[in-house]
Image: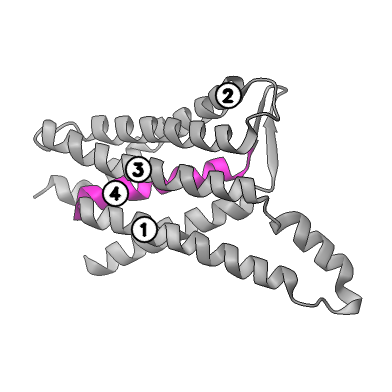
Amino acid sequence: MQNKLTLLTALFVTSVVTANVLAGKVVAFGNYVILPAAVVTYAFTFLFTDIINELYGKEAAQRAVYFGFFAQIFATAMIYLAMILPVAPFAQETQNAFEILLKQNIRFVIASMAAYFIAQSWDVWFFNYLRKKTNGKHKWLRNNASTMSSQFIDTAIFITIGFIGTVPSIWAMILSQYVVKLILALLDTPFFYLFTRQRSRR
């Protein structure tokens, strides 16, 4: 069981850090839904914390959130260090591509950190709250309700801090991203049941 918790925490932290890197790529579904590629990867983080919460409890899930937060800080520091190290003369083109992909606007870093910590902590707390209120029944309810609400909190905080004053409609941007996250949240329910089935057998 300890090995499984370690693996889930590692996957959670990897998803968090990877999402920050993938945020540099913007994808489009049709003409109206434009999102960072990180949306898909980041959606997995809520699934992982819900699984950890269900199998190992609130404290383990919140600990994973702390690990993810510090991992983001460490990754950002390491990327910045790599950015300022002197580049080899023959690799200047590679350096330019490296900076385009990984150089982060401080405003987005603050937005990402704030949105992550508040939304993930809410997800852990609200999931546990619903489990207690329903006496451990209705797994689908706590999985979906905690993820859907925390995804909205995450989106609202990130978009507001990162884009207020630079886009025509903050709410249009929030809602368009949230709709996609809402669909992803619903799709993770079967996986939540699959990976927590041993708890149901106790």
In the picture, the quarter occupied by the N terminus is: bottom left
User: Which three-letter amino acid code belongs to the residue tagged 3?
Assistant: Phe
Give the residue type at disc 1: Tyr
117 is higher (above) or lower (below) than 64:
above
| In this rendering, the label closer to the viewer, 3 or 1 | 1
Crowding at dot 4, Cα within 10 Å, few <14 / some 14-19 / many 20+, comes out as: many
Name of the residue lying farthest toward the front: 165
- Percent from the top left, x then y, of residue 187? 42, 34
Q: Residue at x 36, y 58 (%)?
A: 66
**Which of pointers 3 and 4 lies earlier in the amino acid sequence?**
4
Q: Was residue 112 drawn as part of the magenta stretch in this picture?
A: no
Q: Which mark is residue 191?
A: 3
Mark 2 or mark 4: whose residue is earlier in sequence:
4
Q: Which residues are magenta?
A: 36-57
Which of discs 3 and 4 lies nearer the camera? The answer is 4
Residue toward you, 30 or 126: 126
Residue 23, given in percent of the width and then of the height, sits at 63, 47
Question: SS of the residue at dot 3?
Answer: helix
Instruction: Tell me the SS state at disc 1.
Output: helix
Residue ID for mark 1: 66
Nearer to us: label 2 or label 4: 2
**Label 2 close to label 1 by CB (< 8 Å):** no
Residues at marks 2 and 4, CA–CA distance in whole angstroms: 27 Å
Give SS at disc 4: helix
Residue that label 2 marks: 176
Q: CA distance from mark 3 to mark 2?
A: 25 Å
Look at label 4 and name its amino acid: Ile
Determine the main secondary structure of the stretch shown in magenta.
helix
Marks 1 and 4, Cα distance to the nearest angstrom?
16 Å
- Answer left or right for 15 relative to 2: right
First along the sequence among labels 3 and 1: 1
Residue drawn at x 60%, y 24% as measured from the top left: 170
